[in-house]
Amino acid sequence: MTNVLIEDLKWRGLIYQQTDEQGIEDLLNKEQVTLYCGADPTADSLHIGHLLPFLTLRRFQEHGHRPIVLIGGGTGMIGDPSGKSEERVLQTEEQVDKNIEGISKQMHNIFEFGTDHGAVLVNNRDWLGQISLISFFT
């Protein structure tokens, strides 16, 4: 049996290929699925690169699935070296907190919270900040 959500995503050109197409459609037809998408708080606002993954996550929510919106407060403290040849610019904890606040407000404009399939907003600093260096390496 086809799935309306999968058909919509294909129609929009958002699925090029997938594994176990029938298994995924059966799962989405049978039960509520929980899935996530995340962003590091490198600025106080989302940017155009966040649009596609977060709107796709919102489409899943509109079809009765539960999104987890992850803000990388822990990973955002480290910085992103990808595609760069110079040293990472580390943000202060205050700057990361300000960025998290701005992005969180935007997420509340995109997602529905507090319902049966309401989004859950999490910050990976909540658990990464509790890991000691020794625990991390063992």
Image (cartoon, rainbow, N blue to C red):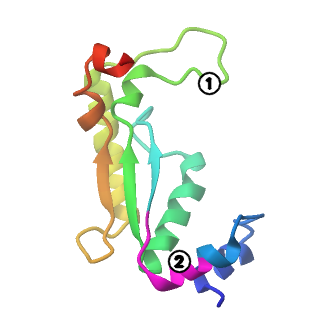
Q: Is residue 39 above or below residue 135?
A: below
- Give the CA separation, mark 1 to mark 2: 35 Å
Whether 26 is among the magenta residues is yes
Q: Residues within 10 Å of mark 2 (few under 14, many from 20)?
A: few
Query: For the point 66% across and 12% down, which residue is it?
Result: 85
Instruction: Please identify the quarter of the rendering in which residue 112 is found.
Output: bottom left
Whether 84 is among the magenta residues is no
Percent x, y of residue 74: 34, 30
Q: Is residue 105 above or below residue 6?
A: above
Residue marked by disc 2: 27
Give the numbered dot on residue 82.
1
Q: Is residue 127 above or below residue 14?
A: above
27 left or right of 1 in image:
left
Which type of secondary structure does the marked residue at label 2 adopt?
Answer: helix
Q: Residue reaching furthest bottom?
A: 1
Residue type beneath disc 1: Ser
Q: Residues within 10 Å of mark 1 (few under 14, many from 20)?
A: few
Query: For the point 71% across and 64% down, which residue is it?
Result: 19
Q: Which residues are magenta?
A: 25-34
